[in-house]
């Protein structure tokens, strides 16, 4: 089966501390994650000074302040991202980061060969920002927290248009997006380039609001790869999503859940992250392929536990085979009992002693 791409989401769990950010790369690498993802933003481009925190942000941070004040503390200097990428290369783990504003998107695309661009749930209705992502030509992971199918389709329409145009047209009509989405070329490019993540945008997300069945709905409707961005406590949801076919799993992690910050509480500690990834990899192994055939281990047991047609009594050459003079006993390897009806009434071509395999 296709290997699940596991993103260890560092996000802002470095708390603006460079040393901690580098330590998170060590943790993600040692856990066996495929990638570690940070978040890139300039607070002044992301939030107005008076935008309020989400309730979970103030609750988990233990501080009541504006979003701008909170985000300013969590910014990392642009130059430091080169150190992060270098550390990721050293640890053989993919470096990813989510851009939350145009400057950050341009910075990431211009300076790093990112395997994916991640569009966060809060930007799924930001059409111009979606278009900027698609115009880069990069593979995109689209998170869909707080959204419905209609909003997802509108976002995909813009992405399809951007991929197909490659350069931003001077004039765009609303129907241009719909036409791109409905075109064969648009469908093909979305299937090739986009992975849609189901998500419940609360920290921590409640189990009764996870709704993993929506992944199948998304996959069937849009014919793209699907995944799950997990904000629940623990990792049972991520593991379940992988079992249900998620090609990408994104899970927040932290060095210490007791640290103050908006996302630490809904994150895994290092031991939990490693355990989750181990279980997902074990599931991939046990799922195997779609081909039903005896395994190598089974083959050595096959003739031991299956049966052959045997002589129930002495059978002379020329004597007819009947249900009275035949039985079915181990080992296998002789004539299968499935051939009983084929030989009933026919004459034996040799003498058989009692218990001889036919």
Image (cartoon, grey):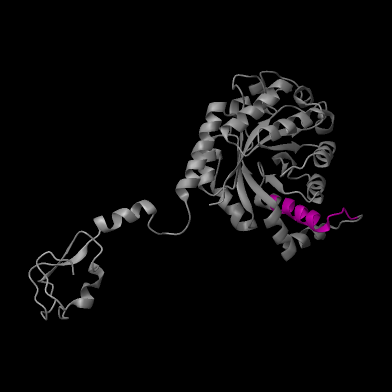
Viewer-nearest residue: 330 or 237: 330
Is residue 110 shown above or below 70? below
Query: Main SS type for the magenta part?
Result: helix
Question: How many numbered markers are drawn?
Answer: 0
Residue 7 visible in the snapshot:
yes
> Which quarter of the rendering shows the C terminus?
bottom left
Answer left or right for 302 relative to 287. Answer: left
Is residue 16 shown above or below 299? above
Residue 182, image quadrant = bottom right
Viewer-nearest residue: 130 or 283: 283
Residue at the extreme right of the image, as rendered: 170
Is residue 339 shown above or below 116? below
Q: What's the residue at 69%, 46% (across, down)?
A: 142
Residue 333 percent across, percent down from the top left? 26, 63
Residue at the extreme front of the image, as rendered: 350
Stretch in magenta: 152-169
Residue 256, image quadrant = top right
Residue 91 percent across, percent down from the top left? 66, 32
Residue 104, image quadrant = top right
Residue 283 percent across, percent down from the top left? 48, 44
Q: What's the residue at 66%, 36% (across, down)?
A: 92
Q: What's the residue at 52%, 48% (across, down)?
A: 244
Residue 183 visible in the snapshot:
no
306 inside magenta stretch = no
Answer left or right for 318 relative to 87. Answer: left
Answer left or right for 15 relative to 341. Answer: right
Residue 248 percent across, percent down from the top left? 61, 45
């Amino acid at each position: 089966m296709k290997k699940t791409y596991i993103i260890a989401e560092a996000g802002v769990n470095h708390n603006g501390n460079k040393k901690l950010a580098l330590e998170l790369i060590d943790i993600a690498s040692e856990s066996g994650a495929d990638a570690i993802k940070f978040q890139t933003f300039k607070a002044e481009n992301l939030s107005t000074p008076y935008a309020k925190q989400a309730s979970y942000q103030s609750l988990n941070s233990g501080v009541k302040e504006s979003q701008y004040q909170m985000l300013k503390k969590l910014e990392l200097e642009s130059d430091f991202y080169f150190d992060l990428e270098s550390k990721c290369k050293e640890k053989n783990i993919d470096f990813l980061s989510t851009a939350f504003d145009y400057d950050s998107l341009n910075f990431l695309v211009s300076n790093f060969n990112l395997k994916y661009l991640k569009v966060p749930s809060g930007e799924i209705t930001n059409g111009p920002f979606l278009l900027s992502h698609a115009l880069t030509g990069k593979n995109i992971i689209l998170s869909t927290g707080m959204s419905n199918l209609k909003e997802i389709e509108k976002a995909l329409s813009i992405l399809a248009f951007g991929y197909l145009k490659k350069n931003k047209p001077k004039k765009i009509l609303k129907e241009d997006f719909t036409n791109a989405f409905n075109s064969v070329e648009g469908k093909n490019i979305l299937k090739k380039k986009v992975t849609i993540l189901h998500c419940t945008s609360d920290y921590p997300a409640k189990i009764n609001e996870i709704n993993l069945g929506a992944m199948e709905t998304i996959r069937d409707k849009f014919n793209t790869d699907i995944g799950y961005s997990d904000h629940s406590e623990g990792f049972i949801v991520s593991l379940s999503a992988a079992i249900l076919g998620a090609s990408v799993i994104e899970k927040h992690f932290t060095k210490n859940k007791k640290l103050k910050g908006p996302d630490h509480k809904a994150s895994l500690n290092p031991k939990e992250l490693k355990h989750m990834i181990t279980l997902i990899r074990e599931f991939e192994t046990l799922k195997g392929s779609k081909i039903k055939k005896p395994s190598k281990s089974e083959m050595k047991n096959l003739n031991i536990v299956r049966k052959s047609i045997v002589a129930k009594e002495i059978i002379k050459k020329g004597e007819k085979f009947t249900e009275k003079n035949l039985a079915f006993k181990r080992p296998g390897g002789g004539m299968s009992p499935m051939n009983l009806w084929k030989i009933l009434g026919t004459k034996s071509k040799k003498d058989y002693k009692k218990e001889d395999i036919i």
